[in-house]
C-alpha cells in the first residue's frame, strides 16, 4: 500500500493529464483525477472529489493537489465532510510539479506527511539540509562522486525520480550540485543536461553506501538503458 | 409574523430560485468582467437542483432542515467557488438553527452570523477583499443592531448587503479569480457580493 493522490482541477483534461504524467513515474501509486463538473464542463465537482478521495485511499491516506481557487474550496469542503479527515492532506503546491513530486515520494513508500512535504517542496521530515547539523562523527562519514550524465535528456523527470528514490533509501543526507537529492522538485530545477558533470555528496552513517548506489544507478543510465 | 418557520424558509428558497433564474445573466455579466463568467449559470444550476429536492422534505420541515437541504445540494451541484462557499454558509446556518421550529430575531441573527463565519472560514477572505464577505459582514452587523422584530432584522440585513455589494466596486480584489486582474478589477461590482445581496433581499421580501 502507498499513499494515494487526488488531482482536483477545473478541467477534466488537466486532471487526467496530470495523472498520466505522474503515473509514468509511480506506477504503483493510486492517482485519481477529479476534474471538471458533473456534466463535463469547466469547474469542480464535490461529488467527483468525494468519490476520488475514497478511490485513492488504500488505508495510508491521500494527498490532494488542486489548481485554482474553487478546486481548493471544494477539496476543503470534502475534507470537512469526510468520515476520516485525519487521512487527507491538501497540498499547497503547484498542481503539476507537486503531483509528480508527491507521486515519486509515495512510490518510495513515504508516509502521508512525507508525501505532503515532497509535494510542497520541503525536505522530508527525517532529512536535514546537508550543510547544517553536521556533527563531527557524521562529517567523518562522507563520500562524494562526480558523474558525467549520459542520459539523452539529462536528469529529466524519470531519471530524476530514480535518483530521488535511490537517495531516499539510505541513512544519509544526499545532495546533487548542492541541492537535496531527495527533493524531486529541486533536482528537476537544476536542469542537468546530457554531458553535465554532476557532483553527488553524501554525509551520514550510510554515506558511502548511498554514493555507491548512485554510481551504480548512473552506470545503468538512471533506469533508462 | 412572530418568527420564521420552515414553511417561510421554503417560500424564501423558492423565491430565490425564481429570482436567480431571472437575474442569472446579470450575475454572469458581472463575473465575466472580473472572473470566469459563470456565476449566474452556476448558481442557477444549483438552486434549480434545490427546487427539485424540496418536495422530498417533510410536510412541516424546520428552518434548519430546509437550510441543510440547500447546503448539501449547492455543494454538489454549483461547480464554482460559490458551491463550497454558499454550501458552507447554508450548512453552518442549518447547524445554528438546529431543530428549532421557528427563528425569532435573536435566532435569525445567530443563523446569519454562522453563515457569514462559515464563508469567512472557507474562503479566508477579509472585508474589502472584494468578495461576498463584503456583503455578508455589513448584513450581519446591521441585523444584530436591528432589534427584536424578524422583519426589521431581514430588512436591515438586505439593505446593508446591497450597500456592501455596491461598495465593492472601487476595490482591488485580493481573493478569487479577480485577484489576478489587479487594478483592472476597479469599477466592477463583485458578483458574489451581488448574489448575496439578492438572496438577502428576497428574504426581506418573502412573507
Image (cartoon, coloured by chain):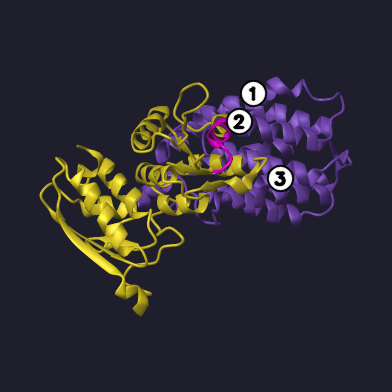
Q: Which residue is mark 3?
A: B92
Q: Nearer the viewer, mark 1 or mark 2?
A: 2
Mark 3, residues whose alpha carbon is within 10 Å: few (<14), some, or many (≥20)? Answer: many
Q: Position of residue B40 (x, y in %)?
A: 53, 30
Instruction: Please give the letter of the chain rendered in purple.
Output: B
- Chain of the residue displaying label 1: B
Disc 1 or 2, which lies upstream in sequence? 1
Disc 1 or 3, which lies upstream in sequence? 1
Quadrant in which residue A41 is drawn: top left
Residue A189 in the magenta stretch? The answer is: no
Magenta-tinted stretch: A50-61
Q: CA distance from mark 2 to mark 3?
A: 16 Å
- Chain of the residue displaying label 2: B
Taking the image as shown, residue B194 lies to the left or right of residue A42, namely right
Label 2 near label 1: C-beta < 8 Å? yes
Disc 1, SS:
helix
Residue displayed at 61% across by 34% down? B75
For chain A, give the colour: yellow
Q: Which mark is residue B76?
A: 2
- Chain of the residue displaying label 3: B
Residue displayed at 15% across by 55% down? A147
Disc 3, SS:
helix
Disc 2, SS:
helix
Residue placed most toward the observer, B88 or A203 = A203
Mark 1, residues whose alpha carbon is within 10 Å: few (<14), some, or many (≥20)? Answer: some
Q: CA distance from mark 1 to mark 3?
A: 20 Å
Disc 2 or 3, which lies upstream in sequence? 2
Q: Is residue B97 above or below residue A124?
A: above
Q: Which residue is mark 1?
A: B49
Amino acid at each position: 500500500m502507498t499513499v494515494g493522490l487526488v488531482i482536483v482541477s477545473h478541467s477534466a483534461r488537466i486532471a487526467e493529464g496530470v495523472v498520466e504524467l505522474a503515473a509514468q513515474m509511480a506506477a504503483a501509486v493510486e492517482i485519481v483525477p477529479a476534474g471538471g463538473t458533473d456534466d463535463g464542463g469547466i469547474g469542480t465537482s464535490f461529488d467527483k472529489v468525494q468519490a476520488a478521495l475514497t478511490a485513492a485511499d488504500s488505508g495510508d491516506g491521500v494527498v490532494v493537489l488542486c489548481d485554482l481557487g474553487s478546486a481548493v474550496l471544494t477539496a476543503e469542503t470534502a475534507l470537512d465532510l469526510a468520515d476520516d479527515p485525519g487521512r487527507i492532506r491538501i497540498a499547497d503546491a503547484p498542481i503539476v510539479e507537486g503531483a509528480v513530486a508527491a507521486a515519486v515520494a509515495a512510490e518510495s513508500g513515504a508516509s502521508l506527511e512525507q508525501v505532503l512535504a515532497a509535494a510542497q517542496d520541503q525536505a522530508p521530515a527525517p532529512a536535514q539540509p546537508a550543510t547544517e547539523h553536521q556533527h563531527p562523527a557524521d562529517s567523518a562519514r562522507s563520500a562524494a562522486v562526480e558523474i558525467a550524465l549520459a542520459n539523452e535528456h539529462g536528469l529529466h523527470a524519470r531519471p530524476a525520480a530514480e535518483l530521488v528514490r535511490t537517495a531516499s533509501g539510505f541513512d544519509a543526507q544526499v545532495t546533487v550540485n548542492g541541492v537535496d537529492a531527495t527533493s524531486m522538485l529541486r533536482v528537476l530545477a537544476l536542469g542537468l543536461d546530457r554531458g553535465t558533470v554532476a557532483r553527488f555528496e553524501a554525509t551520514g552513517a550510510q554515506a558511502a553506501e548511498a554514493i555507491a548506489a548512485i554510481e551504480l544507478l548512473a552506470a545503468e543510465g538512471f533506469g533508462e538503458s | 409574523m412572530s418568527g420564521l418557520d420552515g414553511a417561510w424558509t421554503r417560500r424564501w428558497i423558492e423565491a430565490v430560485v425564481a429570482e436567480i433564474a431571472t437575474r442569472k445573466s446579470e450575475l454572469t455579466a458581472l463575473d465575466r468582467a472580473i472572473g470566469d463568467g459563470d456565476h449566474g449559470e452556476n448558481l442557477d444550476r444549483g438552486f434549480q437542483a434545490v427546487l427539485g429536492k424540496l418536495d422530498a422534505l417533510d410536510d412541516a420541515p424546520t428552518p434548519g432542515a430546509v437550510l441543510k437541504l440547500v447546503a448539501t445540494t449547492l455543494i454538489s451541484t454549483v461547480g464554482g467557488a460559490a458551491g463550497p462557499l454558499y454550501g458552507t454558509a447554508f450548512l453552518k446556518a442549518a447547524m445554528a438553527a438546529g431543530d428549532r421550529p421557528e427563528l425569532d430575531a435573536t435566532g435569525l441573527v445567530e443563523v446569519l452570523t454562522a453563515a457569514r463565519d462559515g464563508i469567512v472560514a472557507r474562503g479566508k477572505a477579509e472585508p474589502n477583499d472584494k468578495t461576498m464577505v463584503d456583503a455578508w459582514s455589513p448584513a450581519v452587523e446591521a441585523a444584530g443592531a436591528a432589534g427584536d422584530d424578524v422583519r426589521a432584522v431581514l430588512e436591515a440585513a438586505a439593505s446593508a448587503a446591497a450597500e456592501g455589494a455596491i461598495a465593492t466596486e472601487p476595490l482591488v480584489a485580493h481573493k478569487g479569480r479577480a485577484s489576478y486582474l489587479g487594478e483592472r478589477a476597479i469599477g466592477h461590482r463583485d458578483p458574489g457580493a451581488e448574489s448575496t445581496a439578492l438572496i438577502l433581499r428576497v428574504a426581506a421580501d418573502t412573507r
